Each structure stands twice: as C-alpha cells, then as structure tokens.
Amino acid sequence: MTPGPDRRPRPLWWLYGLIAVSLTSLGVAAGNLLFHGTLSLVLPYETTTARCEALHRESVDAFRVCAAEQVRVHGSVVGSAALVLLVGTLALAVVVPLWDLRRLGRLGRLDVPPAQQRFAELCRRQGLSGGRTPRLWVAGPAVRQAFTTALPGRRPTVVVPVRLALAADDRFDAVVSHEIAHVLARDVTWVSTIRGPAWLAPPAFALAGVPFLNLVGMTPRLVAAQLGVALLAVVVTALAAALLRLREYAADSHAANVGAESALTASFARAVPESERRHLSWARRMLARHPTPADRRHALRHPVPGYEGGFAQALAVGFVAVAAMYTLLVLAYFGGPQWYRWGDGAVPVVAGVAVISLLFPSLLRRARLPHRGWWRPVLGSGAGVAAGAVFMPVVFLSGPLRYPFVWPGDPARTAVSVVLLALVTAGVVALAAHLAELAARRQRPVHACLAGVAAGLTAGAALWTVGALAAVLHDVDDLRYLLTYGLANQVWPALVLGLLPVYALLSPRRLPGGHRSWLVALVAAALGGTAAILVTPAGDGLTDQLRAQQQRWWICAAAGAVVLVVVTLTTTWPYGWARGVLAATATTGSATAAHYGYGWLTDRPTEPDMFAVDVAVAPLWLGHAVLLLAALLIPLSAARRGPVISRSAGRSRTTPAWLGATAATTATAVLVAAVAVVVVGVGVPGGVAVNAAQRRLAEFDRRYEVARRVLTAEQAERAAQTSALVIPSSWSVAESGPAGRGIVSDGVAVSVPECESLVRERFLAVGESSLRATGKRTYTSDPEDGRFTYTDLTITVYAYDAAVGEAVLTAARDARRACPSFTLDDSLDVEVRAATPPSIGELSWRYDGTMTADLAGDRTLTAQNAYVMLAVGYTVVTVFMSAWQEPLDERLLRLVLTSVEHQLLQP
C-alpha cells in the first residue's frame, strides 16, 4: 500500500526552528558571559563606556560614536561564540554520518538477496523509486539496532542487523517501514545535527564558565548568569531529545498505517514484559532520545498526536520566542544603531512573531482533531513567555538590552511588564487558534495562509504595544498619555485591522440568529453614541474639555466591548467570536462617528490638527479589549462548542429566536447604559490623560483668571485703543458707528435675509443681557496717490459680567454657516468662508471673505476680509480687517489681537 502525501511523516520544522533559535541564544549568552568574565576584555569596555557617558550625557549618538570601538569588540566576541556553536552544529551533518559509514565499512556489509528484494518491494510500495530509493546495508552482529544515516546530498542508507535481515518476516517489514518513514520525512541529514546539542552544550557551558577561573571577575550576577546558561543548555538538549522521540512516534505511526501495526505491537510487548520495569524519572524521560517501548506501544493505540498545539509545545514556543527577542536585540545592538533603533523597537518584535508563527501549523492540525480545546495552548504560551521574560535578563546580563524594556529599580514594574507580556501573548495565541479553526472549516490552503498572515500581523501589533507600554511604566502621566494619544499616532497597532477582512471572509453569510448580532450592535451603537453626545465638560478649562473628550472615547470603546462579549456568548462556536469582533468594530466606529458628527454640526471645540488621531482612540481601546478578552472568551466558547447563553435553565429545548434576540439586546442596552453612567459619574478610568505640553498649556491658561472681571467703559475703551501701539504711524483714526451694529452701515442693503445676522452682528444678542460696557476704535491707511489701495481695521471690545464667550462664538458660527455669500446694495458681491482661528485667547473664531465690485470700463475692485473673535475672561473682542486692492496683512492682524489680549490680562 502506498501512503498518500498527507499520511507521510512530516518533518518537525517547528521544532528544528526552536532548536536553531535556542542554539543561537546559547551561543550569544555564552559569548556575552565570556566577555564579562574576562578582565582583559571587560575592563577596557567598562572604562570606555564610563568615560563616554560622562562626556556625552545629552547625546546618545555622540556616546555611540565614542564607545563604538569597544562595542565592536564586545559584539565580535558575542557573534563569534554564536557562530562557532552554529557552525559546529552544522558540521555534525557531515561528521556524524561520515563516522557511521566508516564504522560500517570497517564492520563489513553482508549480502542477503531475499532481504534486498523485500526491501526494494517495500520502498516501491511506499513511494520511493529511482534516485530517491535508499540503499540497504545489512550489518554484522556488532550492530544490534536498525538506523538510517545519510551524507548531505547523498542517498540515505538504511542499516539493519543481520539477524533481522535473515528472517525477512513481518518484523523485518515493520522495522524497514519504520526506517523508510524517516527517509520520507526528508530530514535524515538534519537529524545528524540534532544529535549534536548533547555534545556541544557542555563545551558551551565550559566556555561560559571562564569567569569562574578568574575569581576577580566573579560576582553574584555572573554566577546567576552562569547557572542560567547551564539551564539554557539543558533546554536545548531537551528540545533535541523531544524531536528525536517525536520522530520515532511519527515513524511508528507510518509503519502502522502501511500494515505493520501488529508486528510493531508484538515487538514492543516483547521488549516490555508484563512485569513492567520501574518507571523512569521525569528528568530521564525528558532527556531520553528514544521513547520507551511502553510509550511507543501506547502511542500506537492512541495515534492522535497529543503534542500538536498542546500545552508543552506552546510552553516551548513561548519560552524560545523570548529567547529570540533577546538574542536579536543583542545582535542588533552590536551590529549597528540603524538596526537597533529600526521601527521604534521592532527588532525584538520581528523575532518574537517569527518564533510564535511556528505554532500556527500545529494549531491548524489541532483544529482538525475531534474534541479539541484551546485552553492548553493559550495557558502554555502565556506561561512560556512569562518564564522566558523572567529567565532571559539573567542569562544575557542584559541591563538596558531587555524586552519589554522597563526602567531599572522597581521590581513591581518589572512584574507588571512580565504579566502584561504573558497576557497579550496568550491573547494572540487564542486569536491564532480561532483563526486556525475557521480556516480548518474551509479546508482550503489559501484560507489557512490568510489566517496565518492575520495572526502574524496581530502578534506584531500586540508585542510592539507591550514594549511601548513597558517603557513608560515609571511615569504614570506618560503611560496615560501613551494609551490615549501616543499609540493612536503609530502604525504598528493598526496591523490588528488585518483580522477584520479575514473574519469577514471566513465567516458564513448565514448563521442561526445571524441578524441578532447586528441588532445588538445597532442598539449598542445608538446608546453609546447618544451617551457620548450627552457628555458635556464641567467647565471651560483644558482639563475639563479633555476629561469630557476621553469620557466619550471610553463610552464608545466600552459599547463595542459589550457587543463583543454578548455576541460571542450567544452565537455558535467558532463563528461567535468572529461575528462579535465585526459587530463590536461596527459599534465603536458608529458611536464614534455619531458623536464626532454631532460635534461637527454643533461646532463643538476639537483639535483640528489631531482629528485623525482622536478618531482612532476609541477603536484602539477596543483592540486592546479584543486582545485581552480573547484569552478568556475563545477557550471558553470552544469548550462549550455552542452558545454559552442558549438554553433555558429548566427546559431542554432551545430558546426561541425572538426571545434570544430580545434578551441579547436588553442585556446589551443595560450594560452599555451602566458603563456610560459609571464613566460619567465616577470619571475617566485612570484619570485625565494630559501630556507635558498640555500640562504647560493648562498652567498657561490660568492667566485668564485675571480677565474674569467686569470692565468699566473706560477700561473697555482703553483696551480697544491699545492697538494703536502696533498700528503703523501713517494710519489715521476713522469715524465709525456704535459698537455691535455690524460690519457695514445701517443703510446698506443685504441681498440675502439669512446673512443679516452675520453682517449686522446680531449673534451678539446672545450675551446682550450681560453686556456692561463697550469700546471701539477704527483705523484706516491712507491710499497712495493715484491708487485705490488701503486697509480698514476695526477693534471692538464687549465687556460682560459673566463668561458668555462660548455662547456668543457658537451663535457666530451658526450665522456664518447660514451665509455663504451675499450682495451689498446690488453692487458689491461678498463670498464668505471658514478660516482657521488664531491661537490667542481662551476661545477664538474667524471667518474670511472676499468682496468684489465691478466698475465701468471692465474695472474690478477686490477686497480681502478677515473677521476674528476672541473670548478673554468676561470680555469678547472682535477685529474686522478689510484690505482693498492689496494683500491682507496677517502679521498686523496678529499684533493687534495680541496687544488687546495683553491689555485685558493686566490686573
């Protein structure tokens, strides 16, 4: 019987990858320890770095240039140690089989024609022909066990003892089929290198033990690193032994599939009599290269590979992933600053994602097994990463070279960073497991590829975010600001968006109760958006404005998280989580759009230059919730295999669809409302996020407290006249009408009735009941001889007995929005447009305009207008500037505004 391609043994490439990374880490750690323990190397390094730090405290680049030579020496020692270990391991691919073949040559080769014929027949049946056919070597009595060896690029050689070849019975078929399985796996040459770690780990340990030969250089830190290197060598040896054992299990399974199961079982039974030998200790079992006959017999009875995506595999992957992060971080630091600083710390992230991705094929295969669960890989990966994050800083003597980086001196912050890394990694593995389950349902390679890419992008976003957060754990204000604004301005967190199209593609269009998730999302979006709209700042200060803004973001993100939980728990596995993520994203996006749309319609104060970042904050917070909730909800849903909330407690039948939809939407509404009440009533979780610049701005804004007073008529007039200090001396004072009567004379007709409010300044009526005094001054430049070029400038000061600035500015915005254009006296066309207000005053607003007049003889006169309104304490200032046939003097306009504000801020 010829096995199909999917039944042939697969090379354990994920385990080869873990061993290669672990060997590299061992070499780097041993070389680093050798350098720090050798006085002739470490003393010049420490002296140079101390001197460079003293000379260049303010410049990292200058420090690197100063210490470049010693860093290069350090890097050469570390790199050489790693290279020697890897080259030595690869050399074993030639040395080991060459040694085997020479030993066989000395022992001689026996000719047993029946065995040769039977061997050729077994090879043909199992798909080996032509140049791929191995050769059979019948060895003498000195060889007791069958094995397979091969030089690189040569045909494998299957060696069997003569007593087995002479029998040529079922036992011969079983043993040969077992060895043919190794040939079919195409890793016979690589296995020769895997035997090497047991030989090379002791030399590496001895190399790292050089500090013990020099008692002057031995410190508790070096002793701990020495023990850590020893444990890392044990890990490498244990991984190599595990690979060899798994190969034996896979070969036994292949032999059983081609008809040799009974012969193998009988052989194992003879090797282990009924009076079972004493059990091996767990340490000997872990380091054993061959499984015991009892274990092999048990594996034949239970052919499902339990390690696929299990706890032990995930534990090893998580541990080695952290080792890869540290190894690449150290190599990048010694390799060059451009690599070390690439992508704001992306070097360890790339290494971690590459190692974690080795787990995904096993998750795919586990998803195809019956009764699979996802608690084991999730818990295993988290535990492995936590162990590695605690273990690796000791092994690598890392100091500042650690991931996630935490400022030294506080074990609590270090523990928080380790727990955060473990939780996020567990969430990433849970998402990868769910993607694997979805792809396994589709059974198409392209879907598995897309799922793997989405899992890799999510892992990159998550690991980079953990590193960024850990770096600011020492400063609560910086941490709060990073979570609120900083991450929204980065590209890495956006990689998690790759989940959305993959979920949309892999989810079926129709599900039982499928419309329920969108109904829940609609209710949550409506409630969340409404609650966000209703949030108003408690005052006019910067902190109050930021608190209200962040409360809106919390409400929008929490609404999405509620939808995620409800939809996941009420929808059949595995589509509940995918549908929940899509519905949650739609909820948060819709709620965010609702409150920002309302703010745009009502001119709610926003930061125009940060609008794109602000919009991304709530979806980003939802992404954090998705990562953390995945580690809990995905294994929980997978364990139940159905909707967690699906059946009535006292009945065996399924709850009616309409009742389930009503319960889900009601629960969503209650939860969203409760979250909104808590956020608004209790406050922003963690306090208001304010960065250093905003803190300085808040302190700077306290100067406006002096302007919260009622001005007398004389003070208002003096504030308007202050502008004379910056007006060019050639300008003159012009007569003007009463304050608040508009930008044109009363007798001028306005063609559009809707524009009367803007032109006549009727929006000032909002604060008329609080108006106590006014001051006004108008200036004009003298036209040049023979040219119609001049500028008019009018400054008006309105003194109130209360803070009415925001109400007046809001009314002015409404008036401007209702009036895009109009004509004055049927001869002067005016176009009005919004403009960016100046950063002067507590509140400011501006609109610009263009006036055009057609004269006889095809002549046209044009004027550029600017209307600016400031709110300073209890005072509102308007400045109207009109430049005819010349550019508008923006510098003069700003000087006028600054001078008036300065006068109002005087005690």
Image: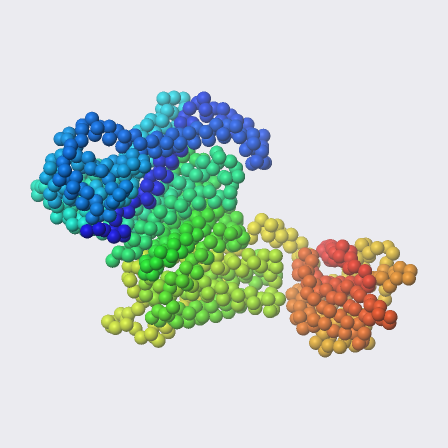
Give coordinates of residue 399: x percent, y percent: 45, 35
Q: Which of the 4 quarters of the picture holds residue 865?
A: bottom right
Would residue 378 be found to the left or right of residue 624 on screen? left
Give coordinates of residue 131: x percent, y percent: 28, 41
Would residue 42 be found to the left or right of residue 649 on screen? right
Residue at 32%, 37% in the rendered image: 153
Q: Nearer the viewer, residue 580 or 548?
A: 580
Q: How many marks?
A: 0
Q: Which of the 4 quarters of the picture holds residue 768?
A: bottom right
Residue at 40%, 56% in the rendered image: 450
Residue at 22%, 38% in the rendered image: 135
Would residue 19 be found to the left or right of residue 529 on screen? left
Q: Which of the 4 quarters of the picture holds residue 829?
A: bottom right
Q: Where 455 falls versus 149 (above or below)?
A: below
Q: Where 219 falls versus 187 (above or below)?
A: above
Give coordinates of residue 5: x percent, y percent: 27, 51
Q: Where 399 falls versus 787 (above or below)?
A: above
Q: Nearer the viewer, residue 24 or 421?
A: 24
**Colour basis:** rainbow
